[in-house]
Amino acid sequence: MRKLIYAINLTLDGCCDHTKMTPSEELLEYYTQLLRDADLVYGRKTFQLMVPYWPDVAKDPSASRDDRDFAQAFESANKIVFSRSLDDAEAKKGDKNARVVRTNLRDEILKLKQAPGKNIVAGGVDIPSQLVTLGLVDEFHFVVHPVLAGGGRRLLEGASLPEKLQLKLVESKVLKSGAIALRYLKQ
């Protein structure tokens, strides 16, 4: 069975707004490695933040090597986009490996997990919050940045867990920027 991984950047106060954090080469390397062995699951908002930005970076010869490596890993990954308003043609215009899904989130993810293939990485806030609530996330990759944002979108904002979710820390790495990459398994 494929693993469903929730990967996200956070500030120390739980903010997951990407504009509150400063990317680094090491951070891009971390996520590039994660994406190389994954299919991606996003909601429309996160997908539209990533596309066309990263596909454009992949083609930009003036972009840094780390940016291009991440962009190429992102571009080559299969993407499943949950959206009621975006259609398949619109998504494919920006990314040929994207597919829009309108079916039940739980059913679609269970079907994906049963299919052969790579790990599945969910990014963003809305869809992953629903997946956590449904108990479908197997692993959590949180990169905690040494920043107090003081405001912005919070991790699992608005989610109502049926019970406390106990996680087991299986790996941690301190990045040069002071951010800490944490990998947890669901117990």
Image: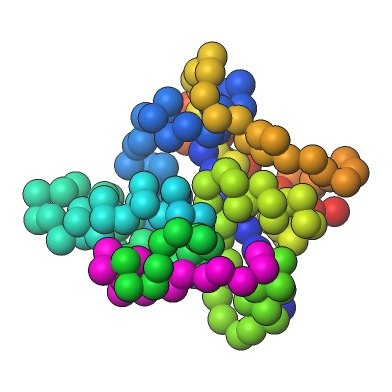
Instruction: Inspect the magenta stretch and tell me whether residue 92 lies in it.
Output: yes
Q: Is residue 147 above or below residue 49?
A: above
Say which residue appears at 79% left-offset and 47% top-offset: 168
Q: Is residue 60 above or below residue 173?
A: below
Q: Is residue 95 left or right of residue 176?
A: left
Residue positioned most to the front: 85
Instruction: Measuring from the top left, give residue 158's x and y in whole percent.
Output: 70, 35
Say which residue appears at 15% left-offset and 61% top-offset: 59
Residue range (magenta) = 91-105
Say which residue appears at 44% left-offset and 73% top-offset: 99
Instruction: Measuring from the top left, give residue 97's x and y in whole percent.
Output: 36, 74
User: Closest to the observer: 10 or 27?
Assistant: 10
Instruction: Inspect the magenta stretch and tell me whether residue 56 lies in it.
Output: no
Instruction: Measuring from the top left, give residue 86's x and y in whole percent.
Output: 41, 62
Instruction: Measuring from the top left, give residue 94's x and y in whole percent.
Output: 27, 64
Residue 69 lies in what quarter of the image?
A: bottom left
